Amino acid sequence: MIDASILSVFLVLPVLGAVLAWILPARPNAQKTISVTVSLGLLAASVLLAILAVSAQKAGFVLRERIPVLSDWGIAWHVGVDGLSIAMLFLSALVQFCASVVAAPNGRVRAYHSLVQLLFVGVNGTFLALDMVFFYVFWEVMLIPMFFLIAIWGGDDRKRAAVKFFLYTMGGSMAMLLAMLVLHFQIPETGMTVAVRNAEVREQMTVGSQGETYLYDLPVLASDSLGKPVVAAASDIASGSNRPLFVPVERNFDLLHWKLLAPYWADLQILGFALAPVALAFFFVAFAVKVPSFPLHLWLPHAHVQAPTAISVVLAGILLKLGVYGLLRVAWPLFPAAALDGANLFAWIGVISIVWGGFAALGQSDLKRLVAYSSISHMGFCVLGIASATSQGIAGAAFQCVSHGLSASLLFLLVGVVYDRAHHRRVDGFGGLAQIMPKFSAIFLLSAMVGAGLPGLAGFVGELSSLLGAWVNPATRVAGLVAASGVILSAAYLLWTVKRVIYGTVKHPEQRAFSDLNTAEMAALAPLAALSILLGVWPGLLQAALGPVSASLAGHIAWVAGLR
Amino acid sequence: MNSVALTLLQWTPHELRFLLPEILLATSILLACVLDWTLDVRSKRMVVWFAAFSAVATLVLAVVAGGSIGQADPASMFSPDPLGQFVRIAALVGAVLVLLAFNGSRSIDGRAEQGENAILVLSVALGAMLLASANHLIALYLGLEFLSLSSYGLAGFRAHNAKASEAGLKYVLYGGVASAIALFGISHLWGMAGTFDVREIGVVLSSRGGVDALIPMFLLGSAFAYKLALVPFHFWSPDVYQGCPTASAGFLSTVPKIAGFAALLKTLMALLPWWGVVASPVAISTFLALFATVSILVGAVTAGVQKDAKRLLAFSSTTNAGIMLLAFSSWITRDAVAGVGLYLMAYLAANLGAFLALDILERSAGSTNLAALGGSWKRHPFAVVSLAVCVFSLAGIPPLAGFAGKWAVLTEVVRASMEDGLGLAPLAGVVAALFGSVALAAAYLKLLRATVVDDPAIADSATDDSWKPAHLSEIPLFLCVLASILLGLGWPLLSVFRSRIGG
């Protein structure tokens, strides 16, 4: 039987890859083979997890382990995967595969491939971590490799772009660090007993050898007639009895314990100020920088334009998703009441990103900048969906992460292809490529349609579901209506770009010499394109993993908000 | 002076037992001097070897003698306690590393006077050890002076170099004023309390409720602030580091600071009863937090506009010292002291490592100017990777050592601010420390941009591509890098510190 130790594969494999890529003599193909092999291994592992998740059909963690490592400080090595993190791990492995196949660093090959592997240690670690300290550590681990990847192998203005990326992200992380320290010390040193939602108990319950029940490794207590907690019997919970259930929570950094404390955070006051909205704001800033959400998006176009193709793919394909993942794993579960109170505000932040990013994309003359702004616009739907705090909205946000991961990776890879042939990326510098590069043009059209949210393709499902979620929650309904215009905007700028680049007459005769996609480019593009279609016609495949998690989170939010 | 003489008389061979490492080191310094005079120019390198060997021997003795720590009479002038033992080990490890680096490198500026340099390094280490185990204001002053005088020599070593002479002179003048101020404060304290023993001073002053003792305290405190290069006493450090041979600057920026922190900590702890009388805990921790905040922010922002790598590291040291001072605003709890211990270890490894790496880069680039360091990654890949690790550790990026130290310090300050009713100033200090870290990271990125990312400047005649460092000089650098990585994973050390030096 598969146990939680398989999760360490997601960290050990890239570390091994990094070491191997560094110690072997520099030969581009040797290092590339290592990167591709590692990503294939991770892909296999994540498919295995995905099978587990889809077959389990539950909201809870499919695999999870918790080993106290620094108990004096309440820190534990706590990792686990549910449907959401498995979807993200799969996307991460897929993006790593595509980025490795097309990787073409101009020099310093060993360093390049080592740094890419280290970057994915951080990415995968963040998706696995269920302890706030390790979440933070992995979050920061991504900074250093990404800085060098942009600063060394990027375009002309790469150094400024890399510094901008580093400082924006680090500023956000500092907000996260401060918020987590303050929260930690709000838990009484002696620990506390909190009431839990019975649905949560059923999802996360395990039964010990003595028949006692556990929730996230914590014994579950039921209260007796005098309100005094007693250890609950397994039968009590299995029978669905509605006796209030209590669990003890220690002073620690455990995200799952912190989630149980959501009602406690909601009531907490410091110096007469409610803590929850402030802490939520700090976490939101940390994650919104990564998403990136208006007004913290300024680093993204710059970083994208300067980064080499493969790194742009990684940035758009997976790094941005970490922001959404952070909102779903940390910010919203911990402060559901404050999040609901601010639903309107957060929804508008999402909508401004959608509309602003869309208009900015319309005005771009550089293909990469255009795709970068379209990323800001598309990721806005994630923020909108999460802000609605409804089951549909959350599922839509998570789905949009995957579909945007596919469409943005496709578009950046394709821009990389034309840049490789033409050595420029000006939209008006192309025309009629369909006559010259039919395979390229077909995939370009498909990617644009995925991005524009055409029904039958992956992009449609996430956007529709986010908008539905926004409609369901009255507080975000107006914002949702405005956001729907973003769909038209994205169709406008993407299809206009398609028209100018691949249709019409060949404007530059020298482009007739361009070769169509080669094998490596096909190998990177084909799986992404295939998956975009597959998820469009069979969204249930992904929804099976995301649905229960979203429903559970929405239920949690509603429960905590209802306690007031 | 009567009490000084009395204290001296009370010394017995039994008491001297606790100072055996210091005695051994002092003897080695004298022997090294004799060796340096007698050897001819070509074999001066023997002196460095001898110095390194005696530092290792002292280290072994200090570790072996560690068992008797705490048995020494706390009323004697020097009584090594666990904190003193910590400084002993740190100072000797630092001395061994920097001596190895000297030995592997070519002579400084083509001169063969490494012997004297090595002797000065040992003296600085001895001064640091004495300062950290002083219990008595006269002993404290002697330790401070011993440390400072040797440091002046080390800083102004390249006597024919204008920058070095400036560094030496500035250091002497600034240091002279600081130590005169300290002495003035000490004399006042003696006048008020009638004793030099810091513990007794704390008791006497608290019983007489001496608010007036705040003035000599501030005078004494400014001498510490000078040693630690805290704002506004930090102006000497960039000039001194810049003029100093780079490896020596690494040593000067770490070991004396560790000793300074230990002595400050000891003094503050001994005076705790008095603090309680003169002001409320909130007032004192607010004062310390504000003082720390100013150093953190000024250091971080000023580091960002530097054009020389050594000046940049000097200002970053000010920020790091500020963060450690911030720990004291938690009313010097056990966890805060342990956190500062871990921070100091991380700082020793990372800062010394950064300077040692820079030393290697400087020899090819001809200077430590950021513009001259372009393309260093091509010439010295190992030194550049090491520099990156050390600098990221200094910036507090996990999972490196600097993060563990920062984590330990900041968590304790947040806890104290929330739970011990010390007001919001320490928490505000934490906010400043976090955003100061971002500003400082911007400065560090400039350094890394120059060394790791930039290509060599075209037709740069000053660079010497053929020079390769001796492998021996890369060993101390490697050890620093290893420590910067392992200490980041070695948080359990914190519990060791907590039980030992947390007092």
Image: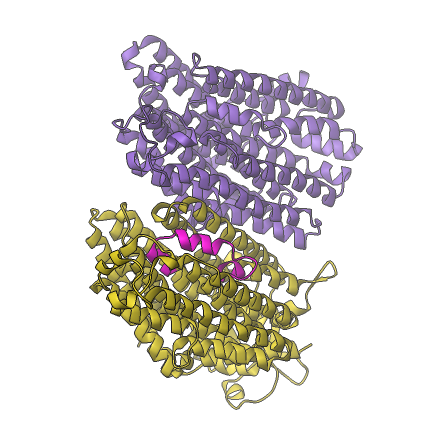
Chain colours: A yellow, B purple
Region rendered in magenta: A287-314
Question: Which residue shows up at 52% across the image and 37% down it?
Answer: B304
* Closest to the observer, A553 or B407: A553
Can residue A35 be seen from the camera position used here?
no
- Residue A441, picture quadrant: bottom left
B225 in relation to A464, above or below: above
Residue reaching furthest to the bottom: A239
Q: Residue at x 53, y 78 (%)?
A: A467
What type of secondary structure mainly makes up the magenta span?
helix
Residue A128 locus on image (x, y percent): 42, 66
Q: Quadrant of the C terminus of chain B?
A: top right
A464, A422: nearer the viewer: A422
Residue A93 is situated, as x and y percent measured from the top left of the image, at 33, 66
| Residue A31 shows in the view | yes
Q: Quadrant of the N terminus of chain B?
A: top right
Number of numbered labels in the structure image: 0
The x, y position of residue B336, in whole percent, is 58, 45
Residue plotted at (40% across, 15% down)? B116
| A312 is within the stretch colored magenta | yes
Residue A277 picture location, percent across and down: 65, 64
Side of B332 relative to B125 (left or right): right
Asked whether A169 or A442 is in front, the reply is A442
Residue A87 part of the magenta-drawn span: no
**Which one is in front, A458 or B139?**
A458
Task: Give left or right: position of A28 versus B152.
Answer: left
Place residue B470 in its image quadrant: top left
Image height of A420 relative to B268, above or below: below
